[in-house]
Amino acid sequence: MTTTANAPTVRTQEIDGIFVITIDRPAARNAVDGATARALAAALDQLEARDDLRVGILTGAGGVFSAGMDLKAFAAGDKPIVSGRGFAGITRARISTPLIAAVEGYALGGGTEMALACDMIVAARDATFGQTEVRYGIVPPEGGMVRLPERIPHNIALELLLTGETLPAERAERFGLVNELTEPGHALQRALELASSIALNAPLAVAAVKRVVNERRAFSDEDAFAEQDLIADPVLASHDAQEGAHAFAERRQPHWEGR
């Protein structure tokens, strides 16, 4: 089943439990202004609030992911920051649902930071990432300096952050920043396929895996296992865990209930 909703600069579409969020300002290379940031935050709230939406995909219209902040709007006093949630309503938000970035064309500045806020990135071969802020006397405060060194080798992250050079998608894939490369125009389709693979799985288990993996860095090994057990034990004792075992034994597809 597919349903579609529209806001002035953000479109959403539901496809079999997958929620596609599209930045729709192609004339501005999908740069984010205040209205777009608020619309993205509202879309992410919808993704988080509904149990029937299992995976989210963030992408851009017109063959471009996002050029980052709308500098013209920013110069006029319109800031694309949502309180407590950062740039575009995503870079500092706590999102429990798996989120995939489908990147075509440019993902520069805040565009790269939005992609870094996602759990996985699927990109076209001709896509380009970049934290070019130092060239303009500023820094990338919405994830570029924090997340990029965690996703690619530390020295390569420093090279990119200090020089402001762009990162072609094929090089990004070699460093592990990009999960999968596609031919131009096919990033969203491959992201949908990846999302479908995730959506088939038990929602409690998926949520627990994401939480443990994302929170692991805050703990020592001993503390990490203790924190993991608090999250994982209810999943292992859940109805869905029993259903998964029964479905395997009975050679049938499981029916997940999220409990």
Image (cartoon, rainbow, N blue to C red):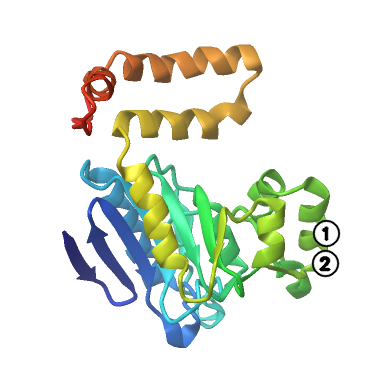
What is the crowding at mark 2: few (fewer than 14 residues within 10 Å), some, or many (at least 20)? few
- Disc 1 residue type (three-letter): Glu
- Residue 129: x, y in percent? 64, 67
**SS label for mark 2:** helix
- Residue 45: x, y in percent? 30, 51
- Residue 257: x, y in percent? 18, 30
Residue at 50% from the left image edge and 17% from the top image edge: 227
Q: Is residue 155 above or below residue 134?
A: above
Mark 1 and mark 2: Cα distance apart in space:
6 Å
Which residue sits furthest front?
A: 251
Q: Quadrant of the N terminus?
A: bottom left
**SS label for mark 1:** helix
Residue at 66% from the left image edge and 47% from the top image edge: 151
Q: Is residue 121 above or below residue 227?
A: below
- Quick check: marks 1 and 2 in contact, CB under 8 Å? yes
What is the crowding at mark 1: few (fewer than 14 residues within 10 Å), some, or many (at least 20)? few
Give the labeled residue for mark 1.
Answer: 159
- Residue 221: x, y in percent? 64, 16
Give the labeled residue for mark 2.
Answer: 163
Position of residue 71 in the picture relative to residue 202 (left or right): right
